Image: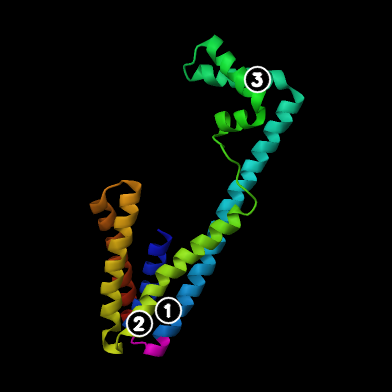
Amino acid sequence: MAANDGIIGTAGVLQGFAGAGASSTTLLVASVSAMVAGAVAGFGSKYAELAAERDAQQALIADEASDLASDDADELADLAEHFEERGVPGPLAEEVASEMHRHEPLAAHLETEHGITEPMRALQPLAGGAMNALALASGSALPLLILLAYPAAWESWAVFVAVLVSLAVTSMLVAVSARTSVPRALTRTIGIGAATMLLSYLAGVLIF
């Protein structure tokens, strides 16, 4: 999906400049600038998102650890009550809670009450940001390659067609891997891509 964003974003910028009658050199500069800016922004947004999620996890972990240290019995009762609320009979809920509490009390509370099975590691926000930036840059590189490969008279159309084909391929891969509807994924992604390029081109024409 990040690659799709890179494809659409850079293609939109190129179509806007093409609509304004920009030269090949200007289109090249615009394409590289869009790729770099998109990758940096993609890194920053993903890093901030994951870092905030990790901060929230760490706060929950600290709260649970503090609660266990201050009142272990009350936390055990809360764990048993959690299972009872989900339909487990009282005696069995207490037995399960007691067994989980005996082995790894903090992990048991984090997973059962907050859905945290594995706390996010310190480097995960950086790794996630880097992967998102790489995906965006990879997507942005396609319009750039088309720009370098085709004569100036065909650049706008070549980018338009190549972008739609690329979006179709990536959308199918995403839909198949997620086991969702391929036709719906194609319709959404190709529609957004085509609309972005057409509106960007129109904006360039009107401004010029």
Residue 202's spot in the image, x, y percent? 30, 76
Q: Which residue is mark 2?
A: 147
Mark nearer the N terminus (3 vs 1): 1
- Disc 3 on helix, strand or loop? helix
Which residue lies at the image location 46% right of the left edge and 75% below the top edge? 34
Of residues 147 and 193, the one drawn nearer to the viewer in this rendering = 147
Farthest residue, direction left? 183
Labels 1 & 2 near each other (Cβ < 8 A): yes
- Disc 2 on helix, strand or loop? helix
Under mark 3, the amino acid is Leu
| Camera-nearest label, 1 or 2 | 2
Under mark 2, the amino acid is Leu
Mark nearer the N terminus (2 vs 3): 3
For the question of whether residue 76 can be seen, the reply is yes
State the CA–CA distance, disc 1 to disc 2.
8 Å
Farthest residue, direction front? 103
**Crowdedness near tag 1: few (<14), some (14–19) or many (≥20) residues, C-alpha within 10 Å:** many
Farthest residue, direction right? 70
Of residues 14 and 116, the one drawn nearer to the viewer in this rendering = 116
Residue 128's spot in the image, x, y percent? 54, 56
| Camera-nearest label, 3 or 1 | 3
Under mark 1, the amino acid is Ser
Q: Which residue is mark 3?
A: 76
Quadrant where the C terminus is found in the figure: bottom left
The residue stretch that appears in magenta: 20-26
Which residue lies at the image location 57% right of the left edge and 52% below the top edge? 50
Of residues 99 and 165, the one drawn nearer to the viewer in this rendering = 99
Where residue 31 is drawn, which disc sits there?
Answer: 1
Q: Is residue 101 left or right of residue 88?
A: right
